[in-house]
Image (cartoon, rainbow, N blue to C red):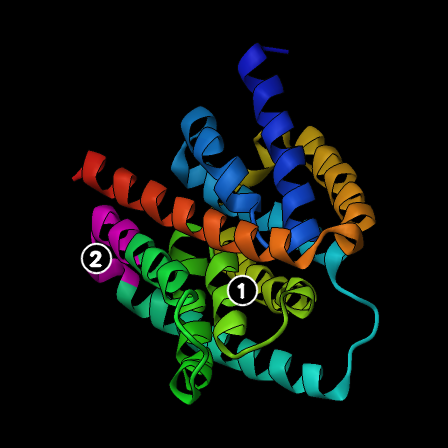
Amino acid sequence: MPFEMILLLATIGLGAVLQVGIGIGFSIVAGPLMFLLIGTETAVPILLLLNVVVSTVATPGAMKRSDQRTVITAVLACVVGIGLGILIYPQLTEAMVLAIAGGLLVFGALSTFLPVTPAGKRAFLPISCLSGLATVWAATPGPLMALGLILADHPVSVVRKLVQPIALIAYSLAFLLHAAVSWDRITDETHLPAFLAVTVFGSLIGRWIGPTLPRAVISSSIRGISLLAGLILLYRALTIS
């Protein structure tokens, strides 16, 4: 197996550990190298598929009733965002899509350093909708979902858990939409079984270490990864424009 593919498998495993352990990180860690090695058109649906696997492993078995309401609200807003994303996408260039998604991530990461206010809590619904846009466009909704939950004043230990069922539904819907037009690209990828195996293995490790991580580590990691993801998308937008 080529060294580049071994490196990609390692990043997929690390991304799965982060996604389950802190709530986000899979697409940000695994995405750039996957885009480079197998191409954007193939990488996006495969990233969505692998994210479905990660979120399935990470989704908690039981939630409080208040948490269930939060998840349902976020999912509905995210689905609306996915629908809007599908309608808007043909009107935008790839550079515009990446720039918008990157700008939203950078703004969201920086906004979490502001004091929690009623306006911040009300921002949860539109941010969830925007995460749906990011799901379809760049396969990176996780940071926006987590940032929206933080702005709504949810403890980071809860954010780590709540983002998983939201992502599971959003990724599944987006994957089905992509698969309807690019199923051959997904099944023709010869390394897909290895991608899936490493994803499951990393997800199980993340589920094991996640509860032991300090809250400060989770919070700082969410902000840092979100900011990094936004900057990477902005850089990609500038280099292809």
139 and 49: which is toward the camera: 139
Residue closest to the eye, 222 or 132: 222
Residue 229: x, y in percent?
41, 46
Q: Which residue range is magenta in the image?
A: 89-100
Which image quadrant: the N terminus? top right
For image coordinates 38% across by 86% down, the residue present is 119
Q: Is residue 136 visible?
A: yes
In the image, residue 240 above or below residue 95: above
What residue type is disc 2 on? Leu
Residue shown at the point (57%, 58%) measured from the top left: 219
Taken as a whole, is the magenta stretch helix, strand or loop? Answer: helix
User: Which residue position is annotated with label 2?
Assistant: 92
Secondary structure at numbered mark 2: loop
| Amino acid at dot 1 | Ala
Dot 1 corresponds to which residue? Answer: 146
Does 157 sit left or right of 124 as displayed?
right
Nearer to me, 103 or 210: 210
Residue 150 lies, in percent from the top left, at 53, 70
Q: Quick check: 74 left or right of 230?
A: right
109 relative position to 14: left or right: left
Q: Is residue 18 above or below residue 165?
A: above
Residue 123 falls in image quadrant = bottom left
